[in-house]
Amino acid sequence: MEKIFMTTPLVEMDGDEMTRVMWQMIKDKLILPFVDLKTEYYDLGLVHRNETDDQVTIDSAEATKKYGVAVKCATITPNAARMTEYDLKEMWKSPNGTIRAILDGTVFRKPILVKGITPYIPTWTKPITIARHAYGDIYKNTELKAPKGSKAEIVITNEDGTETRALIHDFKTSDGIVQGVHNLDNSISSFARTCFNYALDQGEDLWFAAKDTISKTYDHRFKDIFAEIYENEYKAKFEAKGIEYFYTLIDDAVARVIRSEGGYIWACKNYDGDVMSDMLATAYGSLGLMTSVLVSPDGKYEYEAAHGTVTRHYYNHLKGERTSTNPIATIFAWSGALRKRGELDGLPDLMKFADALEKASIQTMEEGIMDKNLSAMSTLPDKRVVYTDEFLDEIAKRIKL
Ligand code: NAP
Ligand code: MG
């Protein structure tokens, strides 16, 4: 068989622990036998990030800007324990945070639906994709305690030195707390454009929700920016594609989401996205089936699994045990990236391969072959728990080109 041809390299970001082990297995068993794979390789494993003073993370993000499509393995975000475990020079920042900042990107999380894993909301027969605005609000706040007898104000000092003041609260009767939050028109606009572009790319409706009835300046600004950009830049394109954009109150959005069948993109402010993405992940069933893609406003894509490096399994692997870890979300990161590469470079065979790889993965699980965690959730009558490498072999057998 002739291998499928590629023209432009994918940016390949390797990672840590169990997902690093699976990364190599996925390439060996599912990609390299079929595709004449071209990648520009960046080792984002913690050892190499430490060796390069984290420069490799920045380089990989710059390469993504250059080539347009990346596939990323899960990586360790160091904490105090990792400082000792890896003898680190510094507590390096989260690679995902660094890459997101360089690409000015938005993360879209989408579950993979398979027979046997029924969402807690059984009417959700299609995936709900969630987009979180990952800048500002309470994640970049300033907080103070306010003692009884104090007065808290917001002060904006303009460039010319003049001040605009507003009273927050006069703490006459009790101690209290105050919080200052901000956002940027630039960042909200990038978020809005990325969401509109992604909805067009996926051919799905876009919902955006905030609390503008209560927050008449702050949340209202989000609503207005979305509305202006939609009217001026996207309305015609949405109509041509037969998809819809609408704004609604966050409470109404939650009610609609629960009653819906799925199949749309839900854009959220930072905090709503944080909470709702965890809620959706749990409700759909399994972290091992949650995909994630970082998209920049100018259309650069970085695909990954939403889960982490699966540390507990890795320690078992180091002890020489065979693990039963779910490779599906990482496989879909590869298929997503290869499909997008094929689309951008006009390579239909590469796109077909991505479809075939996803189909084989789903078929394997629907035939009852799966990892231990998924099997504990699956309602299929006949199940067979397999080790990670067997899972991949079973998928490989089912790839039909
Ligand atoms: P995690 O790696 O997602 O694992 C949490 C637990 O979920 C696992 O112990 C496992 O449960 C289950 N699980 C997750 N993915 C699975 C899979 N593919 N197959 C089977 N089971 C799976 O999260 P974590 O333990 O919080 O974080 C571990 C490391 O990952 C940390 O160093 C963190 O910094 C990093 N992390 C990276 C990313 C990223 O790069 N995007 C995201 C999150 C976390 P059982 O142990 O019960 O089997
Ligand atoms: Mg969260």
Image: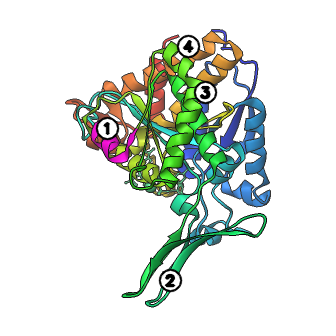
Q: Are marks 4 and 1 in contact (CB under 8 Å)?
A: no
**Mark 1 or 3, closer to the camera:** 3
Q: Residues within 10 Å of mark 4 (few under 14, many from 20)?
A: some
Q: Which residue is mark 2?
A: 151
Q: Quadrant of ligand 2?
A: bottom left
Q: Mark 1 or mark 3, which has the lower sequence index?
A: 3
Q: Mark 4 or mark 1, which has the lower sequence index?
A: 1
Q: Which residue is mark 3?
A: 232
**Mark 4 or 3, closer to the camera:** 3
Q: Which residue is mark 4?
A: 352
Q: Mark 4 or mark 3, which has the lower sequence index?
A: 3
Q: Mark 2 or mark 1, which has the lower sequence index?
A: 2
Extent of the magenta region = 248-257
Percent position of residue 90, x then y: 72, 69
* Residue at x 59% of width, y 33% of height: 229
Q: Viewer-proximal residue, 284 or 362?
A: 284
Marks 2/1: CA–CA distance: 41 Å
Marks 4/2: CA–CA distance: 64 Å
Marks 4/1: CA–CA distance: 32 Å
Q: Is residue 32 left or right of residue 385?
A: right
- Asked if residue 6 is positioned above or below residue 249 in the image, the reply reads above
